[in-house]
Image: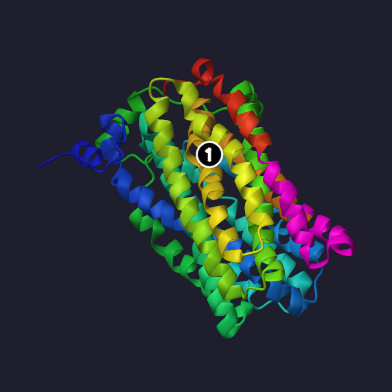
């Protein structure tokens, strides 16, 4: 009978862990990655479905673009980002069961998403969105830490990119489900519908994935005789994370990427509805192609390119994201400029592929720039920046600018905002390039 190590190797994501660690982990890397992908898909489905429902919510509750941006951004992002850091510190503790933590988080954000569907006014919807943010704060850092403990460095970009497919897949399903269900039954039914599956998955998640840190019987005794990891204090963890100049550049680049991505994600849909006259179903299907499918391709491609070309030269882990984002800017501008919506959608596909390629390489580098005891903290700080700066400010600032431009641009005020957003993609491209120059010196071996 073959042992667990053989099965893990055949999974396509060899754990690279010690024999004792492999023996005590009943979940293969492949099963773990697929399960976490489903969780992360629900994470972004529940988070981003508000984008396609923005216009009907605005009409029903009589909201301004600024209020709409507040619901889509800060209402979720502030609590998500702030709570992510202490939760990550808890996840880094050797005694923490990260699978149970993810399960509880999943149940909370799913329940709050369903409650969004029964909100009767702006305040109730705002509070429910805050609840979604509180719940989702426990997912990403814990999942990245689990993946890093189960996958060797040379496959880490691809593995984290695979997990990151939850972003475009969740967004894709949100656009399709939200658009169709809204046109048939209204936006409340759509929110209630997408919140339900997560409650069911939360119940069975601990039965599917086993926490790799758990030890039993003889394996536990062997582990206790081995070297023990030293848990870092909060100040030590922060110093560990920000001692790396490459990490700082990645933090800036990822945060600004999220600022543009979340801002464009919400308002590009409104742009197609307002400037091109599409229905929510038409806009949802169009964006599912441009943002969903293209995002899947870009995320996978970014991870594969990083593992292939970064194996011999660590600098090339971030080469594709850096140059890809610079190339994407003028194409994206053209997509917002043209008047035929079909051509516009087609022009958005390539920039979406190029702008999605950073996820796996960036987060893999983040995990490799610190010791294992600070990995969840390192991931949570980038998540903090991406959500507080990106999701917290992107949709809101884009909405405020749109309101300010209405006297000049009318229905095309969102289009004008997106013109500027297209060219700002050069900024994260620059910082990813600067980070790439320091990777060879700063990346750790494990």
How far from the left and from the top, in percent, is residue 15? 31, 35
Which residue lies at the image location 67% right of the left edge and 69% below the top edge? 276
Quadrant of the image for the N terminus? Answer: top left
Q: Is residue 286 left or right of residue 116?
A: left
Q: How is the image coloured?
A: rainbow
Which residue lies at the image location 50% right of the left edge and 41% below the top edge? 357
Q: Is residue 202 visible?
A: yes
The dominant secondary structure in magenta is helix
Find the magenta span and give its range.
397-425
Q: To which residue does mark 1 refer?
A: 358
* Element carrying mark 1: loop
Q: Is residue 29 magenta?
A: no
Q: Is residue 446 above or below residue 96?
A: above
In the foreground, 53 or 135: 53
Residue positioned most to the top: 441
Residue positioned most to the left: 1
How far from the left and from the top, in percent, is residue 409? 83, 62
Query: What crowding class fits label 1: few (fewer than 14 Cα within 10 Å), some (14-19), or many (20 or more)?
Result: many
Which residue lies at the image location 62% right of the left edge and 54% below the top edge? 335
Q: Is residue 437 above or below residue 72?
A: above
Quadrant of the image for the C terminus? Answer: top left
In the foreground, 249 or 289: 289
The quadrant holding residue 109 is bottom right
Q: Is residue 421 magenta?
A: yes
Which residue lies at the image location 77% right of the left edge and 63% below the top edge? 412
């Amino acid at each position: 009978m073959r042992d667990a190590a053989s099965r893990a190797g055949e999974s396509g994501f060899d754990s690279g862990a010690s024999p004792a660690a492999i023996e005590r982990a009943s979940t293969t890397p492949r099963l773990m990655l697929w399960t976490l992908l489903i969780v992360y898909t629900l994470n972004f489905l529940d988070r981003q479905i508000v984008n396609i429902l923005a216009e009907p919510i605005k009409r029903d509750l009589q909201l301004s673009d600024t209020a709409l941006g507040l619901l889509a951004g800060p209402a979720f992002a502030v609590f998500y980002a702030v709570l992510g850091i202490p939760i990550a510190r808890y996840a880094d503790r050797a005694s923490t069961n990260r699978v149970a933590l993810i399960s509880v988080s999943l149940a909370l954000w799913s329940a709050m998403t369903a409650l969004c569907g029964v909100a009767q006014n702006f305040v109730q919807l705002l509070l429910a969105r805050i609840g979604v943010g509180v719940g989702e704060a426990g997912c990403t850092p814990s999942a990245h830490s689990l993946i890093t403990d189960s996958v060797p460095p040379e496959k880490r970009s691809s593995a984290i990119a695979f997990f990151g497919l939850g972003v475009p897949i969740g967004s894709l399903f949100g656009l399709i489900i939200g658009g169709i269900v809204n046109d048939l039954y209204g936006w409340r039914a759509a929110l209630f519908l997408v919140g339900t599956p997560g409650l069911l998955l939360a119940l069975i998640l601990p039965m599917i994935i086993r926490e790799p840190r758990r030890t039993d019987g003889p394996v536990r005794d062997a582990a206790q005789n081995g070297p023990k990891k030293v848990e870092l204090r909060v100040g030590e963890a922060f110093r560990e994370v920000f001692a790396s100049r490459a990490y700082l550049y990645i933090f800036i680049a990822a945060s600004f990427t999220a600022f543009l991505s979340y801002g464009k994600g919400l308002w590009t849909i409104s742009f197609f509805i307002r400037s091109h006259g599409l229905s929510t179903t038409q806009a949802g299907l169009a964006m599912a192609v441009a943002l969903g499918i293209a995002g899947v391709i870009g995320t996978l491609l970014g991870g594969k390119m990083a593992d292939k070309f970064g194996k011999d030269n660590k600098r090339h882990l971030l080469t594709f994201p850096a140059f890809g984002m610079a190339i994407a800017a003028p194409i994206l501008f053209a997509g917002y400029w043209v008047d035929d919506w079909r051509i516009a959608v087609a022009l958005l596909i390539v920039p979406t592929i190029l702008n999605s390629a950073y996820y796996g390489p960036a987060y893999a580098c983040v995990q490799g720039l610190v010791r294992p005891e600070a990995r969840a903290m390192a991931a949570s700080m980038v998540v903090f920046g991406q959500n507080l700066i990106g999701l917290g400010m992107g949709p809101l600032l884009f909405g405020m600018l749109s309101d300010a431009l209405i006297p000049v641009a009318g229905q095309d005020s969102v289009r004008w905002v997106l013109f500027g957003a297209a060219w700002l993609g050069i900024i994260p491209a620059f910082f990813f390039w600067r980070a790439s120059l320091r990777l060879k010196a700063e990346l750790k071996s494990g």
